[in-house]
Amino acid sequence: MKIVASLSIALLLFSCNKKDTINHFLTKPITQQDLIKNGFYKYSYIATSDDHDNIDDTIKSVAKYDMYSNVKPEVNKEGKVCPTQLWNFDNEDSIKKRKNLDYFKNELESKMITYLFRNNTLFYKEIDVEFFDKSHNQIPGFESWKKIINYYNSLKIPIEPVVKNINTGELYTGLFMVDNYRTRFFFSEEEKYYGMFTNYLNNSTYCNILEYWYSGYVLEMY
């Protein structure tokens, strides 16, 4: 049985224009209502998977995705509403690139926050912080494993590395259980960024957020 994805997309936008008071570096699940109350924008689409085996017993599986972001919307070249483009400017003029990156640096304080819900259940969260701009209050400043561990220890939140090989004791690089949620941390002093990804539904700890959501379009998935 061959399964193909049939997608329809409707982007809905909400912002309460309120100051964000959530500590997003904690792994405790956040509700959609919490995000709306804290001024996040909502982008939604519905993905439908059909079997196309030429038999009149088509089974459809529908998944609704709601993405919440601190990044405001813009209209792309195709006339569709999507998050402001912050990545993949190869085919864009330098004026747009400078304008959008200035927005990211000055209004968002170089911080991109993304939550994805699948069928109203929190799927994953990613936080990306860039530039290490000293003019911004970049707390907690995850620039080393020591700082990451000390941050959660100071809040009395359990954090344990994930074992890769139980026989040798080898650990995954950057992968921890934080308050019992599987979380990957990443940082680079040289490239000046840090961030975290928490998965609430399965063990995957990577999604190309920039490509999926912040490249001037929405790359739908099932």
Image: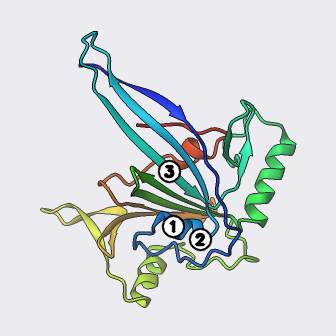
Q: CA distance from mark 2 to mark 3?
A: 15 Å
Q: CA distance from mark 2 to mark 1?
A: 6 Å
Which of pointers 1 and 3 indicates the residue nearer the eye?
A: 1
SS for callout 3: strand
Give the colouring mode of the picture: rainbow
Looking at numbered disc 2 in the image, what kind of residue is underneath it? Lys
Extreme front residue here? 56
Query: Where is residue 211 drawn, in percent x and y?
Result: 57, 42
> Which mark is on residue 37?
2
Q: Earlier in the sequence, mark 2 or mark 3?
A: 2
Q: Secondary structure at mark 1?
A: helix
Q: Earlier in the sequence, mark 1 or mark 3?
A: 1
Q: Which residue is mark 1?
A: 33
The type of residue carrying mark 3 is Asp
Quarter of the image for the N terminus: give it.
top left
| Residue 188 appears anywhere in the view | no
The answer to which image quadrant residue 222 occupies is top left
- Marks 2/1 in contact by CB < 8 Å: the verdict is yes
Report x, y in % for residue 15. 67, 62
In the rendered structure, find residue 66 and report the number of the disc placed on it.
3
Between 184 and 199, the residue placed more toward the observer is 199
Query: Taking 83 as reference, is 150 left or right?
Result: left
Q: Circle 2 — which element? A: helix
Q: Residue furthest top?
A: 54
Q: Which circle marks residue 159 in the picture? A: none
